[in-house]
Image (cartoon, rainbow, N blue to C red):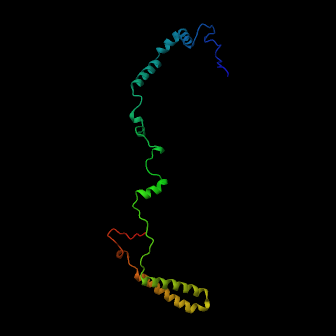
Amino acid sequence: MTGNKNSNENRSHSSDGSGNADGPDDAWAEFMSSHQDELDDLERSRTARKFDKAARKAEKQAQLSVDDLKPEAFTRQPGPRDFQGRSWLDTDDVMDGESTFTPPNPSIGNVRKSTMLFVALLVIGMGALTVSILIPALSAWLGTVGGVMTLIGAAGMFFQHKGHTETRTDAFDDGARV
């Protein structure tokens, strides 16, 4: 390994080159003694007195006031690792554990025969109208029959429909169904 390469090792610390000062403190003391009369004049100057007065006043004042700080300095700000809630990655656990969700029942239940008849008339009538457009030779007969069947099916479904007020289960039922 290489040794410590101190480039200042062989230099003398004397300011005048005579070599009688052994360190920086001695050099400073020598400088102070050689310029004592000039430094005394500076100490007695008006600017030095103003500076001393301002320095004493600044030392007496509080270095830091509460008003200098932001409110965030007194409270601990939460970081990303402080999150205690649930992540979107926990969706399955949340749905299974805390939710009152009940899955929908896919069974249709009992369908009235009149509803089935009107739906069948509507679908067959729409089919007949489509075929009457595609086959011009049968358009008069299929168009008339298909139109009548479509009108009867649509009118029957419309008049059979129960409104929202008739299907309520309680006063707070808003009609939303899954």
| Residue at left offset 43%, top offset 70% | 105
**Towards the viewer: 92 or 124:** 92
Quadrant in which the C terminus is drawn: bottom left
Q: Is residue 128 above or below residue 99?
A: below
**Image spot of residue 163 (x, y percent):** 38, 77
**Towards the viewer: 35 or 84:** 84
Left or right: residue 172 versus residue 128 is left
Q: Which residue lies furthest to the left in this view?
A: 171
Left or right: residue 4 versus residue 60 is right
**Image spot of residue 85 (x, y percent):** 43, 50
Left or right: residue 53 versus residue 170 is right
Quadrant in which the N terminus is drawn: top right
Count the marks: 0
**Image spot of residue 146 (x, y percent):** 52, 88
**Towards the viewer: 29 or 160:** 160
| Residue at left offset 42%, top offset 76% | 109
